[in-house]
Amino acid sequence: MPDLRVMFMGTPSFALPALQMLHAENYQITGVITQPDRPQGRGQVTNPTAVKILAQKFGLPVYQPNSIKEQAFFELAKELNPEIIVVAAFGQILPKLILDIPRLGCLNIHPSPLPKYRGAAPINWTLIKGETKTGVTIMMMDEGMDSGAILEQEETFVDPSENYGHLHDRLARHGAILLMKVIGNILTGTAQPRPQDSSLATFAPRLTKEIGEINWHNSVIDICNLIRGLSPSPAAYSFIEGKLLKIYAAEPKPETTGKTPGSLGESLVNGIAITASDGYVILKEVQLAGKKKMPANEFLRGYKLNPNNILGKK
């Protein structure tokens, strides 16, 4: 098995467990392909990708093409001569010219039970939609978006307390383990790909800033699902006295209130109660623009809330 030549393609931290396992199993990683370093954050500091950092730690050759559709990348991929390509959250769809290079195909780790939640943000939308189960899929890539044949799937329950960060890390680990199983099956000739039923497909589009703004007229469950589906990043948000308030953790408290959605509820020791359509959303962890992230009770000690405030008004 270690003689298998692998080209690895990935960018963010989701891809790290797979790269770690391939390296630990002594597969011959001929090249690591990741996105170019780009400015990030408020200070627009240019940082290397998570995959680049790990690959350099392992002493692996790293390549950062601006586009994998350029002829120069096609020539590079042929030169690296992989027998299999592994893709984990790379960020670009592979063209047919690349898909056809490895004799054993291109494998993708996708954090959803395909064909559900095809697209860029499956983990986020799994939580936003309030799913109680999810999973990881190893598929043989084709030219479509997450439409290739399924090689293996693993299902897992979603804990009601899990946010995006927790579920992301858990599925990344599960996906890496499942990848090792699939590669073993391919090498022994026991892999059994099965086509996806595209009639059952649902989609997980790329997140936009607008998606994160809380509508306090929604139900407490829907609001809390949005908050955990975007926590810790990019974070759901609202406005208080015209200032941006990011919300990282909250609990639903369904009950009849008779109050305007977005208004302050009863005073609590361990949170801030905000009225929704069918109860209160208890804010547990927040961050006001220009301040650090903090527990809601700590926020209350330093910020005087006006009982007439309506959250959401800029």
Image (cartoon, helix red, strand yellow):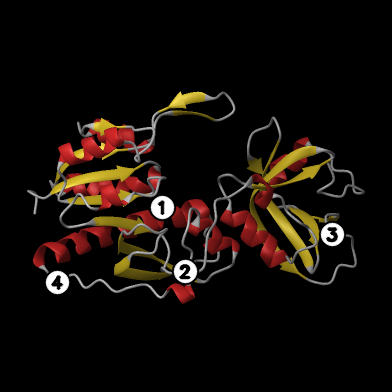
Q: Say which of marks 1 and 4 sits in front.
A: 4
Assign the N terminus to one quadrant of the image: bottom left
Residue ID at (21%, 63%): 182
Q: Amino acid at mark 2?
A: Lys
Q: Is residue 221 placed above or below 37 in the rendered structure?
A: below
State the residue in front, 85 or 167: 85
Task: Please tell me which of labels 2 and 3 falls first in the chain.
Answer: 2
Q: Amino acid at mark 3?
A: Pro
Q: What is the number of the mark on residue 261?
A: 3
Q: Secondary structure at mark 4?
A: loop
Q: Amino acid at mark 1?
A: Asp
Task: Please tell me which of labels 1 and 3 falls first in the chain.
Answer: 1
Q: What is the number of the mark on residue 116?
A: 2
Task: Please tell me which of labels 1 and 4 falls first in the chain.
Answer: 1
Q: Secondary structure at mark 1?
A: helix
Residue behind mark 4: 190
Q: Say which of marks 3 and 4 sits in front.
A: 4
Q: Secondary structure at mark 2?
A: loop
Residue behind mark 1: 169
Image coords of residue 279 (percent x, y): 79, 67
State the residue in front, 35 or 255: 35
Q: Alpha-carbon neighbours of circle 3 within 10 Å: few (<14), some, or many (≥20)?
A: many
Q: Alpha-carbon neighbours of circle 1 within 10 Å: few (<14), some, or many (≥20)?
A: some
Q: CA distance from mark 1 to mark 3?
A: 34 Å
Q: CA distance from mark 3 to mark 4?
A: 56 Å
Task: Please tell me which of labels 3 and 4 falls first in the chain.
Answer: 4
Residue ID at (19%, 44%): 23
Task: Please tell me which of labels 2 and 1 falls first in the chain.
Answer: 2
Q: CA distance from mark 1 to mark 4?
A: 29 Å
Q: Is residue 72 placed above or below 118 in the rendered structure?
A: above
